[in-house]
Image (cartoon, helix red, strand yellow):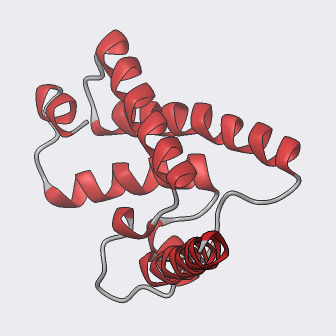
Amino acid sequence: MTDEWDRVGIKKETDYAILTNEITKAWSGKTVLEYKQLKNLKKENLRDNMTNLELVLGMLAEATTTEFSKKEDPKTFQESKTIAVKGGTVAGNTRKDIEKKLGESIITSKNAKNNMKEITSDNVQEIEQKEVLKKGKK
């Protein structure tokens, strides 16, 4: 994504942040700040604290935005901003479709700490089950 923005003349970090925010808002319904607040993040990286579906949708939004940008070849920041919303909206529509079929939101407050707890709990249960099976075979 950043290579494409460089190609079309986007150079300032603040512009990258604005465009990233537009993409995120279009696919998730939240700004980057709102998303970080939902996940109770202070300085942690948002991507490092996303679920698999959140990551995939974010990647879809960025990949789609990149393809639109290549095709439309924007000449101004405002044109790039419009394309960012357009690309994010494609992933946003996908998110809404998945959520409708799942019956629940994909955008979640789960963060890396929550995910580690779940993994640890699952692993403990799995280990305990294996130990029970071993004892039963003796």
Task: Return the residue found at the far front.
Answer: 138
> Eyeballing the image, is 137 above or below 38?
above
> Eyeballing the image, is 130 above or below 107?
below
Q: Residue at x 86, y 44 (%)?
A: 100
- The one nearer the camera, 112 or 79, is 112
Total numbered labels = 0
Residue 135 in the figure: left or right of residue 100: left
Residue 30 in the figure: left or right of residue 78: right
Residue 28 in the figure: left or right of residue 77: right
Q: Residue at x 42, y 70 (%)?
A: 49
Within the image, what quadrant is residue 122 found in?
bottom right
Q: Which residue is drawn at 58% across and 81% down?
A: 128
Within the image, what quadrant is residue 75 found in?
top left
Residue 37 spot, x, y in % from top left: 52, 83
Residue 69 spot, x, y in % from top left: 34, 22
Residue 60 in the figure: left or right of residue 106: left
> Eyeballing the image, is 7 above or below 2?
above
**In which quadrant will I find the N terminus?**
top left
**In which quadrant will I find the C terminus?**
bottom right
- The one nearer the camera, 109 or 1, is 109
Residue 112 spot, x, y in % from top left: 43, 76
Residue 136 spot, x, y in % from top left: 67, 74
Within the image, what quadrant is residue 93 found in?
top right
Task: Return the residue found at the far top.
Answer: 71
